[in-house]
Amino acid sequence: MPMLPTPPPMLLLAGTSEAGKSSAGEYLGALGARRIKIRTILVQLTTGREAYHEGTETREEFVYEEFIAKLIELSIASEAPLVVESFIDAALTVELKRAWPSPCDIIFITAPQALRIRRFSAARGMSTKQAQQIVRRKDDRKRVHEQLPTWRAVADHWIDNSADITSFRARLRGALEAIQTPPGGIPS
């Protein structure tokens, strides 16, 4: 039986609603990482009876191993590091990191709620009140506040995105370089 190639290193993006996960994915993609939205994988697993998971309808009997196998299958197409966004299930994220055969780090991105609301309002051209309702609903649906202690315990990189874009990008670049550097070695 032929050996499958080792999948590339990977960063898993999670965070509070409207904190900058998509911006992080875009930037890491510009640095050469291969960006995959978690929804892309979950939609490929959608068949049979429906059950809600990570914002997508999936089979009731959906198991983490199926997700991991599908991600490995998708990852073999390129040697570039992977960036998978946007996780809302801490348990899936931890299991994926544990099972991934290459370096894998979890990044949690957050910012104060008032700042997230102000940025979202400005970006969408809506009132602060409308933006506040949307951001709060998203946080509630994703059980963000309920899972914060777990995310704090498992995240390899906790990024507060309340500073300037240069600082935010420097932290992201550092995380990408960290998964590409062998222990005690130089970046690949």
Image: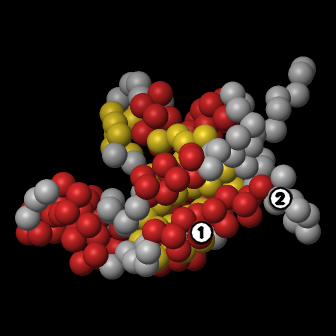
Most foreground residue, 148 or 33: 33
Nearer-N-terminus badge (2/1): 1
Residue at position x 19%, y 63% in the image: 122
Most foreground residue, 155 or 31: 31
In x, y percent, where is residue 161? 43, 73
* Residue 94 at least partly seen: yes
Residue at position x 55%, y 42% in the image: 35
Residue annotated with mark 2: 187
Check residue 59 in the rendering and tell me which mark sits there, or answer none.
none
| Label 2, residues with CA under 10 Å away: few <14, some 14-19, many ≥20 | few
Residue at position x 67%, y 50% in the image: 10
Residue at position x 53%, y 74% in the image: 167
Using the image, determine if residue 91 lies above or below residue 32.
Answer: below
* Horizontal side, residue 10 vs residue 183: left or right: left
Most foreground residue, 173 or 89: 173
**What amino acid type should be assigned to the residue bearing mark 1?**
Ala
* Horizontal side, residue 99 vs residue 90: left or right: right
In x, y percent, where is residue 160? 46, 76
Q: Secondary structure at mark 1?
A: helix
Residue annotated with mark 1: 170
Q: Secondary structure at mark 2?
A: loop
**What amino acid type should be assigned to the residue bearing mark 2?**
Pro
In x, y percent, where is residue 120? 24, 62
Give how far apart the Cα atoms at labels 2 and 1 are. Answer: 16 Å
Using the image, determine if residue 96 lies above or below residue 75.
Answer: below
* Residue 150 at least partly seen: no
Image quarter for residue 71? top right
> Image quadrant for the N terminus?
top right
| Label 1, residues with CA under 10 Å away: few <14, some 14-19, many ≥20 | few
